[in-house]
Image (spheres, helix red, strand yellow):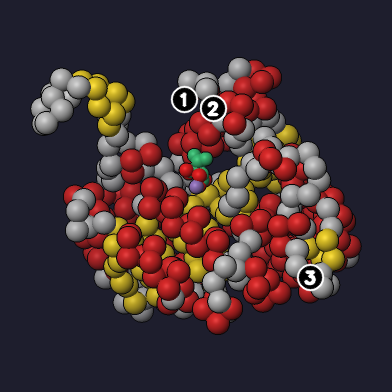
Amino acid sequence: MTHKIAVLPGDGIGPEIVEQAVRVLRALDQPFQIDEAKVGGAAFDAFEHPLPPATLALAKASSAVLFGAVGDWKYDSLPREFRPEQAILGLRREMGLFANFRPAILYPELANASSLKPEVVAGLDILILRELTGDIYFGKPRGVRTAEDGPFKGEREGYDTMRYAEPEVRRIAHLAFQAAMKRNKRLCSVDKANVLETSQFWRDIVIEVSQEYPDVALSHMYVDNAAMQLVRAPREFDVIVTGNLFGDILSDEASMLTGSIGMLPSASLNAAGQGLYEPSHGSAPDIAGKNIANPLATILSAAMLLRYSLDLSPLADRIEGAVRKVLADGLRTADIFEDGTTKVSTSEMGDAVLKALR
Ligand code: IPM
Ligand code: MN
């Protein structure tokens, strides 16, 4: 069976890192149909829209999307609807990609890269499951208006709406418990239930869902405390489930515990099993085009793509094994380079992974 994979390289370092991941996919000798389209600033430049209809149609018609990164300072002054970030938000919304898996794993070879002491992070393996299509990111109403009451009545005010519908909380909670069942059976739900109605509702639903998973130890944590515990004792966590905004912030924090955001893949899935796979890092326009970016997060995202959307776990294992091999061989891109290792370029890292695959 031919699998359709849409490749959306995007902006900044996106094209150069995606190129290496596509080389890896092609080297597997599978009947993949790989089609590429522009997205983000690159699409705005060509078609005056960050998510052109043809790009969205290609993504929707595919089993999986391999996404690079979007964004560049040069688009900062555009109206919001034309900014590169709207492409990824639009893909999430239009494809219903509500479940965002962001693993934060410390590779033993990179133990020194963390800003925390090695004994605090050794063996770190956290899975953050971030709800991705609800919350204050998409809630309406939002905008700027004239305040109708309060101390600033008559003045302009900006506003957004935090909201979660019960089925939205239920479905992400089920996935979180299921993920925990496959791991160490500990789930921490993060909210701000001491202040927010939405959060108290979230917590109540998660507790209801937990009745169906008696083997999972469920805990709840306020987001401010979770931010603290992540740097104090990160290994206390197994699976974290949280809403869109808190998940955005905590997953960046967790990624830095590993010292190497250039290593972390992510998967965003919908109810039909379609997925969008992207590195957890951004478009890094400051180093774009220099052939120095780390392609491993994108290559590992391609592995997640094979495992989650195409049901090709053995091939995913092969890619992950190849990545571990190049790390063990001491090859490092600039972001993870340290004394005693060998500095390689983006394309040389791709070469090395290809060689290790064979
Ligand atoms: C992320 C990014 C996006 C988000 C931005 C680019 C809209 O930060 O994927 O985490 O906030 O979700
Ligand atoms: Mn983010």
Figure quadrant of residue 288: top right
Mark on residue 32? Answer: none
Report, in whole angstroms, how far the alpha carbon at label 3 lies from the one at label 1: 43 Å
* Circles 2, 1 touching at the beta carbon (< 8 Å): no
Q: Secondary structure at mark 2?
A: loop
- Please name the amino acid that badge 1 sits on: Arg
Give the label, 3 or 2, closer to the camera. Answer: 3
How many numbered dots are placed on residues in this image? Answer: 3
Q: Secondary structure at mark 3?
A: loop
Mark on residue 76? Answer: 2
- Please name the amino acid that badge 2 sits on: Asp
Q: Is residue 198 above or below residue 77?
A: below
Report, in whole angstroms, how far the alpha carbon at label 3 lies from the one at label 2: 38 Å
**Residue at (38% x, 39% y) in the render:** 137
20 on left or right of 10:
right
* Circles 3, 1 touching at the beta carbon (< 8 Å): no
Q: Is residue 281 above or below residue 337?
A: above
| Badge 3: residue crowd in 10 Å (few <14, some 14–19, many ≥20) | few
18 on left or right of 280:
right
In this rendered view, identify the residue nearer to me: 32 or 107: 107
In this rendered view, identify the residue nearer to me: 115 or 190: 115
- Please name the amino acid that badge 3 sits on: Asp
* Residue designated by label 3: 339
Would you say the beta carbon of the disc 2 residue lies within 8 angstroms of ligand 1?
no
Q: Secondary structure at mark 1?
A: helix
Figure quadrant of residue 285: top right
* Residue designated by label 1: 80
Which residue reaches farthest top?
Answer: 48
**Residue at (44% x, 57% y) in the render:** 250
| Badge 1: residue crowd in 10 Å (few <14, some 14–19, many ≥20) | few
The image shows residue 155 at horizontal and vertical percentages of 20, 22
Would you say the beta carbon of the disc 3 residue lies within 8 angstroms of ligand 2?
no
